Amino acid sequence: MPRRTLKESFCNAGSGLWFCLKTQRNMRIHLAAAFLVFVLAWMLRLGRVELAILLLAVSLVFTAEIFNTAVEKTIDLVVNDYHPLARIAKDIAAGAVLVAALNAVVVGVLVFLPHLVPFFS
């Protein structure tokens, strides 16, 4: 395989991200949730450290979803018929997304709750 230029590498990465957004419903759900998180963060005027923590949590979810998609597509390429090990591998990859998403929810509660409590007191 010939060596790619930096521009080609970025284009390929962008194509992969676009593929995930186009084809994966959960990726679009994660994107919408992230948008709402950062709108709320902006409205509450969160500090840099809190924004960085939220960004890390959101990025972890996106990364897990991207790897999940890569695992699923690779298995679909290699395995033509149902195989229990293929199912297990796909379930494990989906489990990683679940762990990342639950982590993001906990982080969101820890970051936002102290800022939202005064509005409801």
Image: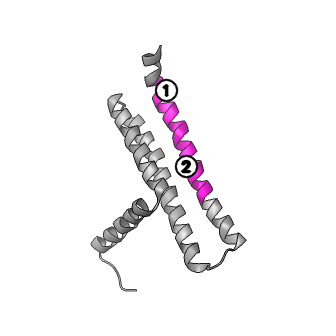
Q: Examine the rendered structure and indicate whether residue 51 appears above or below residue 121.
A: below
Q: Secondary structure at mark 1?
A: helix
> What residue do we see at 59% from left, 55% from top?
96
Q: Position of residue 70 (x, y in %)?
A: 51, 68
> What residue do we see at 56% from left, 68% from top?
72
> What residue do we see at 64% from left, 61% from top?
91
Q: Position of residue 5 (x, y in %)?
A: 29, 76
**Which residue is at the far top?**
121
The three-letter code of the residue at mark 2 reads Ala
Mark carried by residue 85: none
Mark carried by residue 113: 1
Instruction: Evaluate if marks 2 and 1 touch, with contact meaning CB atoms under 8 Å apart.
Output: no
**Which residue is at the far right?**
84
Instruction: Please name the predominant secondary structure of the magenta segment in the image.
Output: helix
The three-letter code of the residue at mark 1 reads Leu
Q: Examine the rendered structure and indicate whether residue 73 appears above or below residue 106.
A: below
Q: Nearer the viewer, residue 31 or 56?
A: 31
Q: Secondary structure at mark 2?
A: helix
Label 1: few (<14), some or many (≥20) within 10 Å?
Answer: few
> What residue do we see at 58% from left, 73% from top?
75
Q: Is residue 95 magenta?
A: yes
Quarter of the rendering containing residue 90:
bottom right
**Which residue is at the far left?**
7
Q: Is residue 17 magenta?
A: no
Q: Position of residue 11 (x, y in %)?
A: 31, 69
Q: Is residue 32 left or right of residue 26?
A: left
What colour-coding does the image apply? one colour
Magenta part of the protein: which range?
A: 94-115
Mark carried by residue 100: 2
The CA span between labels 2 and 1 is 20 Å
